[in-house]
Image: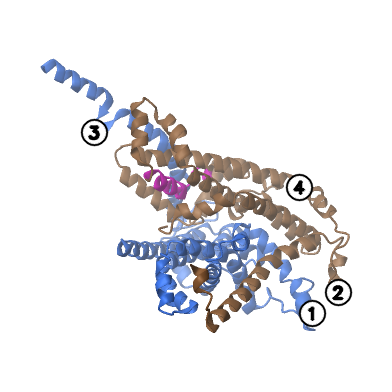
Amino acid sequence: MHKSSSIRRSVGDRAVGIIRTLFLIIMGVIVVVPFLWMLLTSLMPDSKSLLVRPFRLPWPPAFQNYAEVFRSQPFGTYFFNSIVTSISATVLSVMTVVLAGYAFVFLEFPFKRFLFLLVLGVLMMPSTVAIVSLYVTMSNFHWLDTYWALIIPFAADAYGVYLIRQNFTSIPRDFVESAKIDGAGHLRILFQILFHLAKPSIIAYTIMAFKWRWNDYFWVLMMTSSREMRTLPVGLVMMRNEDGGTQWQLIMAATAVVLLPMILFYLFMQRGFNDQYMVGGVKG
Amino acid sequence: MSTQRSDAARIRRKYYWGKYRKNDLVTAFLFLLPAFAVFFVFKYYPLLDSLRISFTSWNFFSAPKPVGLQNYVKLLNSKTFWKILGNTFYYTFWSTLLSLLLGLLLALCLFRKTGRRGNALKTLFFIPNITTASAVAILWLWLFNSANGLSEIIFGAFGKTSPAWLLDKNLAIWTVISLGVWRAMGYVMTIYLSGLSQIDGTVYEAARIDGASEAQQALYITLPLLRPTTLFLLTTNLISAMQVFDVVQVMTEGGPSNATNVMNLYIYQEAFIRERAGSAAALSITLFLLLLVLTVIQRRLTGEEARSNA
């Protein structure tokens, strides 16, 4: 339909077309150039070659910079910590959020509305509203500089409860009722029926939760003090601060080590990533 | 007859508590417990505790000294506080405005491109949004490095010297804003694309028959219909930009002379560098109240929007 009516395009429309293409090219360059600059720098043989003008492509590429990052800095440990804390927090959070969502939609209990309001209340709290008290709490628990501090506070999430509840409400109650008549318990209904019916939204939430944990910097910075407990983002910033900004080829290799896993994860899981916005909907 | 009724009552009592099934109650309790334990221990209790701390003078170690509203009074009388609040609004305003504008333009350009190339571009523009903010901040330091970064190369190509982006009072905050916009615009684009896909295509057919150009269609049809999406994006972007931390902490630590300092970073510095727990708590509570007002406005606006659309 668009084709047939666009045969006789006016001059104005053609101008719009040209401007559009130009705009997309410029924005594409803006998005790509930082990544390109990071990768090019990360393959420079040494810090002296960064100063050569006019700029020359790193040839042969110094892939050993990546090995050097893992050798000279504990990036292996950082990587391990990032993986362990992100995955544990995500798995726990998906479980608690799905259980709570189930209770809010398929079970009857007193104070339901009030309890849900409490969930919405958490949504309104900025992540940093209580850092002073949280720091003291963690210290009292003797959780500072341990995995516990990086996992347990994220073992549940109000946005997740809200999202999953929203999604469960759209599931026909008949499915659940007939399963109950067949004698299925709540856990069986949850795992055998709802997990399948709500799969897209559960996957979308899983990706979202993982992304939040993987990218987090503030919390880890506050709660950890030793090298052994740092995650990738904090380790990278510390590396740059210690270096003072001279060995940029190594710092950029380390930056790539932090950024690339999430980008690859996104490219593989694109459907799920995009679903998170469809599921969340515009209603917020 | 009567025994039957009392049997029914007995069975009801066995399985029900009032109008609730006992089994449901126990299950609900167990299912809600983990989530609510986290919410109470790590959200509600710390919020109330912060409120309490904000009325004291405390350095984390000695006994806290109650000082009433003194922390808040000091804040309101401190030039630094107003400057930092101003910076926070400045950053929030410009990064939100530019991300929405660029994101909207991207969505409008890519909306009808459903082929392979269109999808590839949509994917590309979304990538910045999933990156780690602190790591990109490091990358930005190197891009804008005026001694031997990309900025120096580009300016050098024109025979000029690069401005010292992060040492200049006026340029520093714009360097930070550029990163915020770079990361946010792909998200805005995605939400706008999903908003656009819900618009009924026949509206455009009618407009085209009436001879409206593409630009006119965008201006008079698309934009008004995207109002709910815009409102949603506006408020969520405002709320998240108000809380910017990672980028500023990594790139400038608030400098030069607080020119880029923002609320969350200032709270962090008060608490963990100057060890003024009371003052930091008062700042947190102030930020919380500011965001609460924004959130209430958001609910109002989007709520009304939903009602008027229904």
| Residue topped by disc 1 | B156
Instruction: Examine the structure image and report whether residue A164 is included in the region drawn in magenta.
Output: yes
- Which numbered disc, 2 or 4, marks the residue that appears first in the sequence? 2
Q: What residue sits 51% from the left and 60% below the top?
A: B280
Give the residue type that dot 1 points to: Gly
- Report the predominant secondary structure element of the magenta stretch: helix
How far separated are the C-alphas under marks 2 and 4?
A: 33 Å
Residue B50 vs residue B115: left or right? left
| Residue topped by disc 3 | B19
Please tell me if label 4 and label 3 are on a single chain: no
What letter labels the chain drawn in brown?
A
SS for callout 1: helix
Chain to which mark 3 belongs:
B
How far separated are the C-alphas under marks 1 and 2?
A: 9 Å
Chain to which mark 4 belongs:
A
How far separated are the C-alphas under marks 3 and 1?
A: 78 Å
| Residue topped by disc 2 | A53
Label 2 close to label 3 by CB (< 8 Å): no
Q: How many marks?
A: 4
Residue B106 in view (yes/no) = yes
Give the residue type that dot 3 points to: Lys
Q: What residue sits 44% from the left and 37% below the top?
A: A194
Residue A74: which numbered mark, if any? 4
